[in-house]
Image (tube, rainbow, N blue to C red):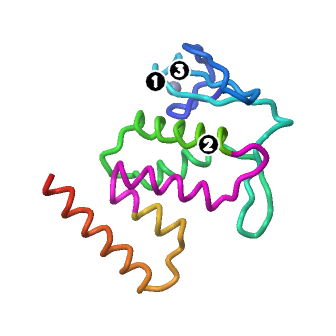
Amino acid sequence: MKCPFCGGTNDQVLDSRPIEHTSAVRRRRQCFSCKKRYTTFERPEEVALMVVKSNNSREPFDRKKVWVGIDRACKKCQVSAATIDRLVSEIENEILSEYIMEIPSTTIGEKILRKLWDIDLVAYVRFASVYRKFSDIDTFMVELKKLKKEHIKRQKK
Ligand SMILES: [Zn+2]
């Protein structure tokens, strides 16, 4: 396993548990080099969940891609690596328990958006702008108005 933080390849498995109804195992690992902790989700390759993309091509689900997408959206936001790791694990667990054979990539995108909405609005809009590819200024403005409202609501709390 490669550490998502420093790229180190030596780690220790702290905890290992099977996921119900699947042949997958979830492992909590700690990197020997940087001592950071992360979660891996392992299942036999032959039963890999396939992601169906908008052009109908398929590729095996890759936790790392979810991680990269969220990490990119969270740049310069106050979201810790541990939080990102937790989000990725939550999303992955949802996906792997709800879908057996394949999942549309759009479903993964919506799940990520729902999580980011609760965590950080700036990260949310960043991810949305890439993922939803706002094609015109009007759709973007609608999204921004929604955010503005939510932001004000949160400040009053
Ligand atoms: Zn490391």
- The x, y position of residue 136, in whole percent, is 48, 85
Residue denoted by label 3: 31
Mark 1 CB near ligand 1 (8 Å cut): yes
- Give the main secondary structure of the magenta stretch: helix
- The x, y position of residue 142, in whole percent, is 37, 79
For marks 1 and 2, the one nearer the N-term is 1
Q: Residue at x 44, y 55 (%)?
A: 73
Mark 3 CB near ligand 1 (8 Å cut): yes
- The three-letter amino acid code for the residue at tag 1 is Lys
Q: Which mark is residue 36?
A: 1
For marks 2 and 3, the one nearer the N-term is 3
- The three-letter amino acid code for the residue at tag 2 is Lys
Residue denoted by label 2: 64
Q: Which residues are magenta?
A: 99-124
Label 1 with label 3: CB-CB less than 8 Å: yes
- The x, y position of residue 148, in whole percent, is 26, 69
For marks 1 and 3, the one nearer the N-term is 3
- The three-letter amino acid code for the residue at tag 3 is Cys
